[in-house]
């Protein structure tokens, strides 16, 4: 279906009734929070916690612990960063995914700094977590983490929110539109994790969404690959942008380990919009391989077919070409070598030393330029309503 045709029928993903029989009084909605469902515990079934004592003692730490099984094993650690038996243990590579499912780290984030970005967001806020229960093979978060990358939740969320509020206040109103947003200062709140999964065990995401609700000059933004229906109740009032990451489903099955299926992320878009979020898409990462153009075209056709007009009208996209990393390549060979056949393509990639000294690889300039031009063509052909905010 092409843009501009009538709004397609889309079933509400979560099956909540939208109409009542005539004269019927609405029944009180009593829904088991998603985080208490078996589906949620397939993502996170915490059996072991490493925690700084101050994090355990904090109100947020206590709230998180009260939601976990009383049998959870707790190990106190001096610092949340590079715990030797976790991040420093090369024997953990074989348990890469299991550790993500069963382990949680609680820490206090001491250095609260907001960094300028200018591409996806105006600013990168100090995130409420670092690490992830999902296991995308290309994920940059574990590049400096060593041999394990479970979620670390930061329990000093009040300090994080207070820092962000001060930063927003200091900016004043945004007077010049830019690619991040025409009116609001955009703050990425999920640079090193996935806020939707964090919300299964912590209210950090809810607290940030609530904080931005009352900041009319700013907007929170986070990318996600997980559909967490509990976020629909957070009432963001347009001040949070959720960016559903999408890629051809065949690539996702190989690379996006433990994430929601791509079709579910797309199907959730209208529910999130109706719940008060701005909904954008990350076309990311774009992985070049034989047949990539055909499969991206199919994905764009799917977006065009199933998304209602109200989603399309406000949607925008980021395109992010794959970058990878030599150290992560070695780690991945230990738990998911098939992914590396796709991600590690020395003939098409060049090495670049990043600012932090890591050796990253990306498609060579020519290959990248041609691929981006082709993607723009595919968008013009199949999803012309999808404005590209930036391509990287
Ligand atoms: S969802 Fe994001 S943070 Fe989590 S593993 Fe995938 S890329 Fe990394």
Image: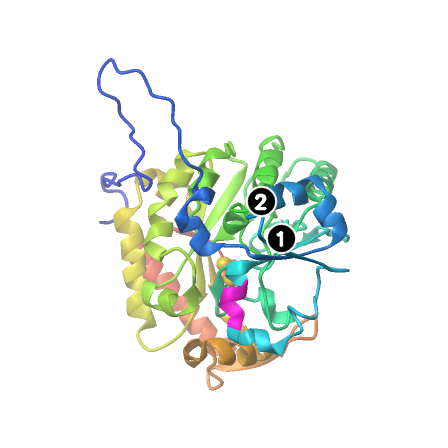
On the image, numbered disc 1 is attached to which residue?
129
Residue at the (46%, 72%) spot, across then down: 369
Specify which label sits upstream in the sequence, 1 or 2: 1
Please tell me whether residue 96 belongs to the stretch shown in magenta: yes
Callout 2: helix, strand or loop? loop
Secondary structure beneath dot 1 equals strand
Q: Is residue 142 magenta?
A: no
How crowded pointer 2 is (Cα within 10 Å; few <14, some 14-19, many 20+) is rated as: many
Specify the segment rendered in magenta.
Answer: 95-99
Residue 202 location in percent, x, y? Answer: 58, 44
Mark 1 surroundings: few (<14), some (14-19) or many (≥20) residues within 10 A: many
Gap between marks 1 and 2 measured at Cα? 10 Å
Q: Is residue 267 visible?
A: yes
* CB contact under 8 Å: marks 1 and 2: yes
The image shows residue 315 at horizontal and vertical percentages of 41, 45
Q: Quadrant of residue 338?
A: bottom left
- Mark number, residue 147: none
Using the image as rendered, state which of residue 26 and residue 94 is in the foreground. Answer: 94
Query: Residue 183 versus residue 232: which sits nearer the camera?
Result: 232
What secondary structure is the magenta-colored segment mainly?
A: helix
Mark 2 highlights which residue?
202
Q: Residue at x 40, y 33 (%)?
A: 31
């Amino acid at each position: 279906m092409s843009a501009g045709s009538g709004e397609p029928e889309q079933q509400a993903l979560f099956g909540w009734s939208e109409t009542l029989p005539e004269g019927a009084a609405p029944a009180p909605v009593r829904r088991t929070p998603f985080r208490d469902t078996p589906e949620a515990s397939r993502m996170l079934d915490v059996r072991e916690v490493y925690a700084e004592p101050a994090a355990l003692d904090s109100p947020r730490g206590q709230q998180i612990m009260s939601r976990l099984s009383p049998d959870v094993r707790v190990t106190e650690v001096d610092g949340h960063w590079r715990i030797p038996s976790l991040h420093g243990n090369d024997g953990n590579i074989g348990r890469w995914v299991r550790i993500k499912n069963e382990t949680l780290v609680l820490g206090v984030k001491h250095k609260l700094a907001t960094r300028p970005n200018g591409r996806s967001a105006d600013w990168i806020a100090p995130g409420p977590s670092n690490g992830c229960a999902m296991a995308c093979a290309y994920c940059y978060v574990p590049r400096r983490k060593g041999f394990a990358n479970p979620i670390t939740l930061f329990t000093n969320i009040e300090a994080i929110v207070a820092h962000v509020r001060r930063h927003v206040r200091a900016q004043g109103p945004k007077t010049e539109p830019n690619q991040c947003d025409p009116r609001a200062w955009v703050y990425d709140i999920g640079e090193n994790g996935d806020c939707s999964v964090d919300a299964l065990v912590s209210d950090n995401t809810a607290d940030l969404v609530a904080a931005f609700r009352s900041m009319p000059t700013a907007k929170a933004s986070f990318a996600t690959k997980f559909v967490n229906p509990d976020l629909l109740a957070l009432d963001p009032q347009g001040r949070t942008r959720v960016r559903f990451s999408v890629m051809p489903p065949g690539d996702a099955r190989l690379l996006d380990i433990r994430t929601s299926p791509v079709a579910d992320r797309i199907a959730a878009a209208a529910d999130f919009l109706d719940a008060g979020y701005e909904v954008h898409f990350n076309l990311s990462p774009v992985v070049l391989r034989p047949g990539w153009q055909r499969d991206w075209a199919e994905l764009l056709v799917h977006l065009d077919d199933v998304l209602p007009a109200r989603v399309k009208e406000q949607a925008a996209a980021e395109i992010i070409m794959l970058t990878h990393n030599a150290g992560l390549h070695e780690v991945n060979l230990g738990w998911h070598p098939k992914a590396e056949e796709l991600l590690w393509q020395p003939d098409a990639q060049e090495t670049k030393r990043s600012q932090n000294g890591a050796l990253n690889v990306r498609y060579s300039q020519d290959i990248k330029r041609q691929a981006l031009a082709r993607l723009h063509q595919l968008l013009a052909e199949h999803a012309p309503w999808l404005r590209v905010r930036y391509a990287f």
